[in-house]
Image (tube, rainbow, N blue to C red):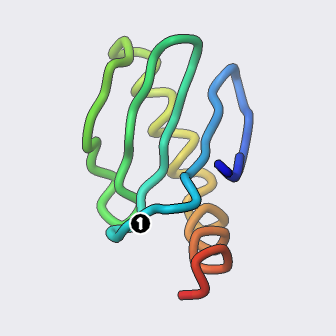
Amino acid sequence: MSPTLLIEDGFKFFFYANEHLPRHIHVVKGDDYATIDLSTLAVRESFMKKADLKKALAIVVKHRGAFEGKWDEFFKR
């Protein structure tokens, strides 16, 4: 199970049911993919075009609190 947290501007933001700390989010757009740390906003890995990654990061910043809340709720932290 991979809870989808948001679909916006062609990006899908989600985490996996068996995630590990630190809290992070996965982002896909088409065949491109990135992982972003929620506490530091560091890009842990990316196979996205630079412009798409920049847009994905902006969306994460905008929804960061909600993403962290969903993470904590799902993993009971």
Q: Nearer the viewer, residue 1 or 65?
A: 1
Q: Nearer the viewer, residue 2 or 77?
A: 2
Task: For mark 1, give the secondary structure.
Answer: loop
Q: Give the image location of residue 9, x and y in percent.
A: 70, 23
| Left or right: 53, with 59 as reference point | left
Q: Residue at x 48, y 50 (%)?
A: 25
Which residue is most to the bottom?
A: 77
Q: Amino acid at mark 1?
A: Arg
Q: Nearer the viewer, residue 45 or 42?
A: 45
Q: Give the image location of residue 8, x and y in percent.
A: 72, 31
Q: Give the image location of residue 10, x and y in percent.
A: 68, 20
Circle 1 Cα neighbour tier, 10 Å, few/some/many (<14 / 14–19 / ≥20): some
Q: Residue at x 51, y 35 (%)?
A: 27
Q: Residue 48 is drawn in which quadrant?
A: top left
Label 1, on which residue?
Answer: 23
| In the rendered image, the vertical position of residue 67 relative to residue 75, given as above or below | above
| In the rendered image, the vertical position of residue 63 relative to residue 45, given as above or below | below
Q: Residue at x 43, y 25 (%)?
A: 33
| Left or right: 30, with 66 as reference point | left
| In the rendered image, the vertical position of residue 70 relative to residue 54, given as above or below | below
| In the rendered image, the vertical position of residue 70 relative to residue 62, given as above or below | below
Q: Residue at x 65, y 48 (%)?
A: 2
